Image: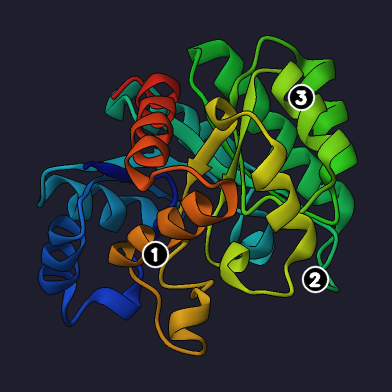
Amino acid sequence: MQLIDSHCHLDADEFDLDRDAVLSRAQAAGVGMQIVPAVTAASWPKLKQTCAAASGLHPAYGLHPMFLSEHRPEHLAQLREWVEREAPVAIGECGLDFFVEGLDADSQRHYFQGQLELAREFQLPLVVHARRAVDEVIQRIRRTGRLRGVVHSFSGSPEQARQLWDQGFLIGLGGPLTYPRANRLRTLVTQMPLEFLLLETDAPDQPDAGIRGQRNEPARLLDIAQTVAELRGQPIEEVAAQTTANARRLFAL
């Protein structure tokens, strides 16, 4: 049984002391591949080095909306150069965050739109962050056109999920799904077509219920897959096979 972590920040400083051990635990849990998205231009070289140092790690380069203070207008031009030279599997992490106070909405839109257009030009999927911004993300995806990707850590409604599927986007679900009170997410995962689902950890963030308050890591993807299987009443092998196929298809793995 093979799993793909569609969203893991394995280049994060939190893993600097034991990254090899984290990778070993992931592989032992059946997590053979990981998509490692960037957050700032300054992080791209370390991310590249991290992914080159181990098999099964696939980089995505982008500019995360929560790190707006670190972005500069010239970073979009630099991103184009990185994408052209490095041939990543996706552009991201990018998107909009209207939850965190103090993040200028218009600046977020500028960087997000620039990355949407790069993804369309290079025919690459997007790894999208959308917190309290799902409607606008859908509108921008639709308006830009000819895009595909994943909205990770999805927290929207079933109707918003359907609109994303219609636009060629999948949804990523991870640790939050494992909490008993996550009623909307748990209902969604029981009812949605499995071909639109990606599994993710978002490690080192968003720990599942079994490690609440601790550092998250990609080996925990097995617990997330088990939760999906239990909620859907399906064998975990079916969940693993379909979500792995979904990730392979989207990221051309």
User: Which residue position holds label 3?
Assistant: 141
Q: Residues within 10 Å of mark 3 (few under 14, many from 20)?
A: many
Quadrant of the rendered structure where residue 214 is?
bottom left
Quadrant of the rendered structure where residue 249 is?
top left
Query: Observer-nearest residue: 208 or 136?
Result: 208
Distance between the Cα atoms at labels 2 and 1? 29 Å
Label located before the other in sequence (3 or 1): 3
Task: Say which quadrant the N terminus sits in.
Answer: top left
Is residue 40 at least partly visible in the picture? Answer: no
Q: Are marks 2 and 1 in contact (CB under 8 Å)?
A: no
In the image: residue 91, left or right of residue 12 = right
Q: Residue at x 53, y 66 (%)?
A: 175
User: Which residue position holds label 1?
Assistant: 223
Between circles 2 and 1, the one closer to the viewer is: 1
The numbered dot on residue 100 is 2
In the image: residue 22, left or right of residue 218 = left
